[in-house]
């Protein structure tokens, strides 16, 4: 009986390690791992394994985040529970806001991204690209705006569809949108 | 008689104007409440008894469909506004214009929870890279692997096939419609599941016709490169504004004999399992 308990504990630990490796190390061009990939690697109980990993990471100020794919309502879930997880993307994010500089991005690039996101949020998450370009063009040269927007799209912070920009999956994963709005309005 | 024709033209113009307005609201994402739905409906109701021809009735139906879409957008608009962090766009736009880039960046950094991920090369990956390098022919020699096909010898355009009497225009249209009806009946389905049938020749024919359904905006392909799946579904409104506005791109999908053989084997196994159970 003890042996069985020991075996199952070893198996659970192995799954936990495998889950951490899969989520910490990049498998694809875009960060994160799809639910079906995790299921294949960890087994049917992959959501439970992710729940245990989430609890373990919580102590280190990190969390497992689940993001619904574009077109699926666009909502992100805190934690890992819930149905229809196989099509969703899972990733590890920092829980608390960063206290120090943690990005090599230039301050004006971050400002461009911040303004674009806030603008899109004010427009219910979607606006024609031309209008966004005009808005950003008030403070930055047009050429710089074009390049920055293309880069944000490539990075997943923005999405582009029929000449309209919308909030990308990466923003949904990384940015606390309510906090951003509050901070901008309070600034 | 002339006066009757003029009033008919006026009715058409008014409907087209309203339709265009609805489409602008839809594509630009402006306030859907700018459309006076009640007035639009009253106009449709007033004109409806006067429509006679099929074109007129189709225009009437199109206007109704567009109006339904506007009502859907209005509902979505209200839902967004009732969302917990709805903020007046005008106020936010003004605030953004006034803010220094540094303060905007600082706000973003405070609300940012970056994804954690590491890129590391493993010995296995390096070995795989080296194996790939060894297997790769010099650049100058690789061109011969993929000789350019002679375009003159592959008359695969529909017009050319009709001109060569290999296909009749009517026959093609009928086959296309039959396939569309089948897709509508089956709904969203795996692409290969849809095109593969009992014979490989028929599967190729279905793939060829399916490419027309997609190109004409009657069906939609859904690609998932990560899962390596391709789904096809009928478009709700064939040749709709969305279909017309969407950027066209080529999607190469291999319909190989091996894939067909694998599919038929899987089908047989599946049928066998079903008969056993």
Image (cartoon, rainbow, N blue to C red):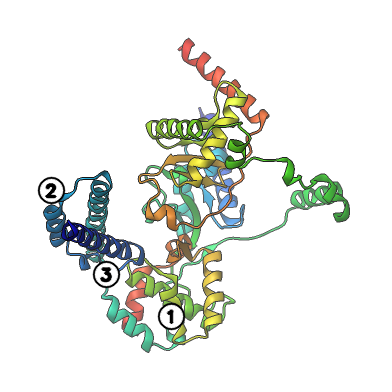
Question: Do the residues at pointers 3 and 2 share their chain?
Answer: yes
Vertical relation: A22 (above or below) B156:
below
Task: Using a 10 Å C-alpha cutoff, classify the residue at mark 3 as few (fewer than 14 neighbours), some (14 to 19) or many (20 or more).
Answer: some
* Residue in front for this viewpoint, A91 or B209: B209
Task: Using a 10 Å C-alpha cutoff, classify the residue at mark 1 as few (fewer than 14 neighbours), some (14 to 19) or many (20 or more).
Answer: few
Residue with the mark numbered 3:
B86
Report x, y in % for residue B154: 70, 40
Q: In the drawing, what numbered circle is on residue B118? A: none
* Residue in front for this viewpoint, B276 or B183: B183
Can the viewer see residue A76 in this picture?
no
Q: CA distance from mark 1 to mark 2?
A: 46 Å
Report x, y in % for residue A105: 57, 77
Residue positioned 35% across, 46% down in the render: B237
Q: Which-is-in-front pick, marks 1 and 2?
A: 2
Residue positioned 23% across, 60% down in the render: B9
Chain ID at mark 2: B
Vertical relation: B180 (above or below) A31:
above
Residue with the mark numbered 1:
A134
> For numbered disc 3, what is the local secondary structure?
loop
Residue positioned 43% across, 82% down in the render: B104
Q: Quadrant of residue B254?
A: top right
- Is residue A102 rendered to the left or right of residue A166? right
Task: Using a 10 Å C-alpha cutoff, classify the residue at mark 2 as few (fewer than 14 neighbours), some (14 to 19) or many (20 or more).
Answer: few
Residue with the mark numbered 2:
B49
Label 3 with label 2: CB-CB less than 8 Å: no
* Residue in front for this viewpoint, B218 or A53: B218
Quarter of the figure that contains the C terminus of chain A: bottom left
Question: Do the residues at pointers 1 and 2 share their chain?
Answer: no
């Amino acid at each position: 009986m003890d042996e069985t308990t020991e075996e199952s504990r070893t198996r659970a630990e192995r799954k936990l390690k495998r889950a951490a490796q899969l989520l910490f190390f990049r498998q694809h061009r875009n960060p994160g791992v799809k639910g079906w990939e995790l299921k294949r690697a960890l087994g049917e109980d992959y959501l439970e394994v992710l729940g245990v990993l989430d609890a373990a990471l919580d102590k280190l100020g990190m969390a497992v985040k689940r993001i619904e794919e574009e077109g699926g309502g666009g909502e992100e879930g805190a934690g890992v529970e819930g149905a229809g997880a196989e099509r969703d993307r899972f990733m590890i994010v920092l829980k608390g806001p960063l206290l120090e500089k943690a990005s090599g991005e230039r301050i004006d690039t971050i400002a461009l991204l911040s303004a674009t996101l806030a603008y899109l949020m004010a427009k219910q998450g979607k606006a024609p690209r031309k209008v966004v370009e005009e808005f950003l063009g008030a403070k930055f040269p047009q050429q710089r705006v074009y390049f920055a927007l293309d880069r944000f799209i490539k990075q997943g912070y923005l999405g582009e569809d029929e000449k309209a920009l919308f909030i990308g999956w990466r923003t949904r994963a990384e940015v606390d949108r309510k906090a951003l709005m509050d901070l901008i309005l309070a600034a | 008689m002339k006066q009757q024709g003029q009033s008919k033209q006026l009715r058409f113009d008014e409907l087209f104007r309203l339709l265009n307005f609805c489409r602008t609201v839809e594509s630009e994402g402006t306030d859907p409440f700018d459309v006076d739905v009640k007035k639009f409906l009253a106009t449709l109701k007033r004109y409806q008894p006067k429509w006679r021809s099929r074109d007129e009735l189709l225009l009437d139906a199109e206007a109704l469909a567009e109006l339904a879409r506007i009502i859907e957008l209005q509902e979505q608009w209200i839902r967004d506004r009732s969302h917990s962090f709805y903020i007046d766009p005008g106020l936010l736009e003004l605030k953004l214009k006034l803010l220094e880039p540094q303060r905007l960046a600082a706000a973003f950094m405070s609300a940012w929870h970056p994804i954690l991920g590491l890129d590391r090369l493993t010995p296995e990956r390096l070995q795989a890279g080296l194996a790939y390098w060894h297997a790769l022919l010099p650049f100058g020699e690789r061109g011969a692997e993929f000789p350019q096909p002679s375009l003159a010898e592959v008359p695969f355009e529909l017009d050319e096939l009709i001109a060569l009497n290999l296909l009749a225009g009517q026959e093609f249209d009928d086959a296309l419609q039959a396939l569309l009806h089948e897709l509508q009946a089956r709904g969203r389905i795996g692409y290969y599941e849809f095109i593969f049938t009992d014979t490989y020749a028929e599967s190729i024919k279905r793939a060829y016709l399916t490419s027309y359904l997609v190109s004409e905006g009657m069906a939609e392909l859904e690609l998932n490169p990560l899962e390596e799946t391709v789904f096809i579904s009928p478009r709700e409104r064939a040749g709709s504004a969305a279909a017309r506005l969407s950027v066209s791109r080529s999607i190469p999908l291999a319909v190989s004999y091996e894939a067909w053989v694998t599919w038929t084997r899987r089908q047989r196994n599946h049928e066998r399992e079903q008969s056993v159970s």
